[in-house]
Image (cartoon, helix red, strand yellow):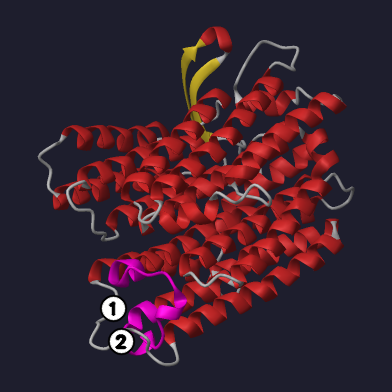
Amino acid sequence: MLSLAILVPLIGAFVLALWTSASTRAARATAIGVSAVPFALLVAVWVGFDASPEAPLFQHLEEVPWIPALGVAWRMGVDGIALVVATMSALLFVAAAAWPIELGERAREYYAWILFLAGVSLGVFLTLDLLIFYVFFDLSLVGMYFLIGRWGHGDSQAAALKFFLYTLAGSLAILLAILGLVLAGDGPLTFDMRELIARQPLAGMDLRGGLVLLGFVFGFGIKTPLFPVHTWLPPAHVQAPGPASTILAGVLLKMGTFGLLRIPMAMMHETFARYALWIGIVALVSILWGALVALGQTSIKRRIAYTSVNHMGYTVLGIAAAGSLVAGHEAARALALTGAVVEMVAHGLITGSLFLMAGSFWQRTQSYEMADYGGLAGVAPKLTAAFILAAFASLGLPGLAGFVAEFQIFAGTFAVHPWLAGLALLGILVTAALFLTMVRALFFGDRKLPEGRSFPDLSRSETIVMAALLALVVAIGVYPAWLLEPIMASARILVGGAG
């Protein structure tokens, strides 16, 4: 089923690319139907996932030899972490395909790229082969480059180019680090992630291990993004169409944090632990910088974009705390790792929803400037309710998904590095201020739209998509056990192995 989750959208993209007579409606319906298949398959895998303490780390394994001389194979499998991130990503692709957007005559190509990106993105989360991981990781850049460059607005070509060059530089650093990791071992050459986790090939190699870790942190740090290699993100988000921004924030950014915990944290325990505090400090700077810069933005999309730097900093902080070898704190480190993964899921759903709604502002007025709006609560009550719910979830209000994630991150980090957790809490205060001021500017006060100009509320399609995403945000906040169970099963094993 994991292979089908990757191959079905890729085949769908190929069919749409050749179906030159497809209308916009047919292309959209095809994209929705095809993107729903991986989501359904992953839900089925979730139902069959064994989260008991006796269960193996990786399950639903599939393997077909590809380049035997190099130890490369089509290896698929999931642990609880990959499963929940991949399932959330599959849902966001369904939402992106279903979200109505004006495309003109190029709808077929747009939806083909959506499906292509769905296939390669899921490949990143589901593969257990490092070389296949890198191939899918690189291909995801291509899909997003075209979505921004061809269907964006403003200076979209420049934004797409900056995105591609930054993230390509990061992926090349990751490739060098992968080679350094794979070639360090004494055993047979292999790119099997399971084997590399067991071998720990760079254990005891201080300088070489540090350089390989630097390559991974730099490459995945660009993708996440972390300060100071985050500058490609705001223009990419601002110029991209709303659904593409949702995929970028909800799926592609997660490749950075997922890569950090899947490769260097799992395969380089000793080296990661040695530098975990420094990684945590970089995460702290990203948290505070992202929140403060977001507070100063007057554009809806730029403000939301910088909150991604802030929130992904929380995720990296949890990963850094989990990878720190502090004796007697295994439970706290597992809690921090669980919180980091929940933050990935929560951020994808919450910020994905916010970017879809930001796109609806552009569709109606061709403006992202908060100063151009005001008093919309009276004319767009459904949009107002959805936006306020997503904003409160993003600032960590109890009862919503963001609180579940951030509480676990801070509780786990406090046990390991209390001063890091204490300073990072300041980011929540600034985040609350930036979202509350944005809600006030957009929906309350005097209406600033030109006289006689309408602002339609969410359409039926938009309401269905938003209701589905935000219902999960509430479900995680109210009853998170169904999400935490598979994550904690894997977190305990990973942290136990690191200890």
Q: Which residue is mark 1?
A: 457
Q: Would you place residue 141 above or below residue 453 in this image?
A: above
Label 2: state its secondary structure: loop
Label 1: state its secondary structure: loop
Corner quadrant of residue 471:
bottom left
- Which of the two residues, 2 or 88, is positioned nearer the viewer here? 88
Q: Which residue is mark 2?
A: 379
> Is residue 60 visible in this depiction of the protein?
no
- Which of the two residues, 356 or 393, is positioned nearer the viewer here? 356
Q: Would you place residue 59 above or below residue 186 in this image?
A: below
- Which of the two residues, 162 or 186, is positioned nearer the viewer here? 162
From the viewer's perspective, is 81 left or right of 465?
right
Amino acid under disc 2? Val
The quadrant in which the C terminus is found is: top right
> Is residue 453 visible in this depiction of the protein?
yes
Per the rendered image, the range of residues in magenta is: 360-384
Q: Residue at coordinates 35% horizontally, 55% vertically from top-left?
A: 153
Q: Residue at coordinates 21% horizontally, 48% vertically from top-left?
A: 107
53 part of magenta stretch: no
Image coordinates of residue 336 in percent, x first then y, are: 72, 55
What's the mark number on residue 368? none
Q: Tell me if mark 1 has few (under 14), some (14-19) or many (20+) residues whose alpha carbon lies within 10 angstroms of its own.
A: some
The prevailing secondary structure element of the residues shown in magenta is: helix
Image coordinates of residue 21 in percent, x first then y, are: 10, 40
Q: Residue at coordinates 57% horizontally, 59% vertically from top-left?
A: 308
Q: Earlier in the sequence, mark 2 or mark 1?
A: 2
The residue furthest right is 327
